[in-house]
Amino acid sequence: MTHWIWYRPSRALLAAIALIFFVVSGARAELLIRITEGAGSAIPVAVVPFAESGQMPAGDKVGSIVQADLTMTGEFRTLPPEKMLSLPSRREEVYFRDWRLLGQRYVLVGALTRSGDRVQARYELFDVNREERILGETAAAPASNIRSLAHHISDKVYEAITGVPGAFSTKLAYVTLDTANGKPRYRLQVSDVDGKRARIRLESQEPILSPAWSPDGEKLAYVSFETGKPVIFVHELATGKRSKVADFPGLNSAPAWSDDGRSLLMTLSKDGSAEIYRMNLESRQLTKLTNHWAIDTEPTYDASGEGIFFTSDRSGGPQIYHMETPGAEPRRITFGSRYNARPRPDNDGEYVYYVHQRDRAFHIARTELKTGEETILTRTESDESPSVAPNGRMLIYATRQNGTNVLTVISADGGAAYSLPASEGDVREPAWGPLVR
Amino acid sequence: MNFSAQSKAFALLLSVGFVAGCSSTGGTSEEGGEYGSDVAAVDQEGGSTVYGGDDQDGVSSSAMTEEERMAAREQAEQQALREVTVFYFDFDTAEIKQEARDVLVAHARFLANNPGQNVRIEGHADERGTKEYNLALGERRANAVQRFLIVNGASRGQLETVSYGEEKPAVMGSSESAWAQNRRVELVFE
């Protein structure tokens, strides 16, 4: 096919290029956390406030951060400290009968010690029924990073109870939109999974879309309209260094990383219609993976890292397709309604998650790949951008709540968990970061 | 809103005729000489309203030939049609609606007659569905309009397309009416 979409910079576009956009590294604009409901089957856990020796940093306590982490998954019900009969901090102080009376299945106790700039934690988790210690460890972090220490403890506790690694130490990327001086202000931000410690990475008057984490958690690829059209950038988080990786005529959109972090899937329309390509990031060489007059977009690697899920409207409306290997004949996955788009795989190859239209509403749904069985997971009605946690247990998506866009986290089987509204304006385009050791 | 766009075009058609008449009496008409006196005559007869019409009254006081009159009228109509620069689409389609065709033909003819004129074709989608699919859908709409303009005489070099997907709604809100107004292609003349 010939190149027939022309793009010449015009005066208006040159003005757009000169737009105010800049990389910010210190500013903060946090999300608020709002826990919507806990599942009925939640496991009762008592997180006893940790004993402290030495000066501790002001702000949230380690115990309360761990308690909040476990609660927000919807998988646990935590006991408020004021209902506890005692506040043990080590094995010898734990009276299992008391905790049984309080209906608790697990008890977490611990102590913090300040030494120099660091805080050390020693913590133990007990199974109340079996009267056994199932976890006993120490961990340390700079006093300025007490939240990281707490999230680490939450990860360990979560894994000890469920057998699955916790994802509390992972990061979220998302885009907020508000208005500043009468102009739209898009901000690409990175925060903890509870919305805390948000940092602005890019600010622009033009839309920012589709943030995608590199597998090592060190880079984000995204689409920015800062030059007046969609262009794909790769942004190194530690340095703020950015490079423009795809700026072809037409669309440059929907970046998705390969497992080795060396190539990106992307949607380009330089040859006519929207097609999926793979770009080797070192050589910038492109391989075309689809070739169809229809829209092919929203690619993502499957759990194996070999195959590719994507959206195509070759059947007449958008549906999810899967290619066993890049370039192979696609197989249609979704049939349940006339609109299914933006697939995201889980990490063990069992399910694919996507946006599903039913009647007039857009929900998040998943299909079990083995059986083809589809389940609608959300009751909200304007749902977009599902992103699965790296441990496969939770899912974040964007939706509307009382007229503004918020992020909502649910368990992977659909139990409601918590929402993350922006402190002002809209928040959209969530991307759950990888587990990083 | 398609209806209101059309009524706007109609009102403009009439007002353009009126304005063209007024300016041409000052000797700066580029719309073709006789048309000006045609409308001016209406004015003199006390037909002061824009809606007074530009046909029967004008015929009686003008030496215009029928062809000239038709040409002038055609030109005014074309110009009025070109006042419409936003075109609407149904959900998840890029099909150009019947009512948009005459207007787009007028734009294409204008571009054919003015090779130095460039236009940016901006494709948009409503907020429903996914952002990246909507980006592709906005492009498909822009491309449909681009093809239509080319088929009707515009040259490819005059046209550039850009899709904003659902990112730049014309109207805020989540109603049927807001969605309908946001599923659009806008022509931006530069």
Image (cartoon, helix red, strand yellow):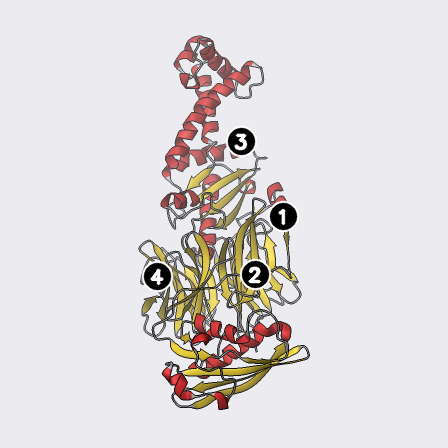
* Residues at marks 2 and 4, CA–CA distance in whole angstroms: 27 Å
Q: Mark 4 points at which residue?
A: A379
* Residues at marks 1 and 3, CA–CA distance in whole angstroms: 34 Å
Q: Residue at x 57, y 76 (%)?
A: A149
Q: Residue at x 42, y 90 (%)?
A: A131
- Badge 2 element: strand
Task: Say what amino acid the circle numbered 3 marks.
Answer: Asn
Same chain, marks 1 and 3?
A: no
Q: Which residue is drawn at 49% across and 53% down?
A: A272
Give the label on residue A189, or none.
2
Task: Say what amino acid the circle numbered 1 marks.
Answer: Leu
In the rendered image, residue B37, in percent from the top left (x then y), is placed at 50, 13
Q: Residues within 10 Å of mark 1 (few under 14, many from 20)?
A: some
* Residues at marks 1 and 2, CA–CA distance in whole angstroms: 19 Å
Label 4 resides on the chain identified as A
- Badge 3 element: helix
Task: Say what amino acid the circle numbered 4 marks.
Answer: Arg
**For this view, does B21 lie left or right of residue A146?**
left
**For this view, does B189 lie left or right of residue A373?**
right
Q: How crowded is mark 3: few (under 14 residues within 10 Å), some or many (20 or more)?
A: few
Q: Which of marks 1 and 3 is in front?
A: 1
Q: Mark 3 points at which residue?
A: B113
Give the label on residue A19, or none.
1
* Residues at marks 1 and 4, CA–CA distance in whole angstroms: 39 Å
CB under 8 Å between discs 2 and 3: no
Q: Can residue B188 be seen in this view?
A: yes
Task: Tell me which corner region of the image, top left, top right, bottom left or bottom right, holds residue A150.
Answer: bottom right
- Badge 4 element: loop
Label 1 resides on the chain identified as A
Same chain, marks 2 and 3?
A: no
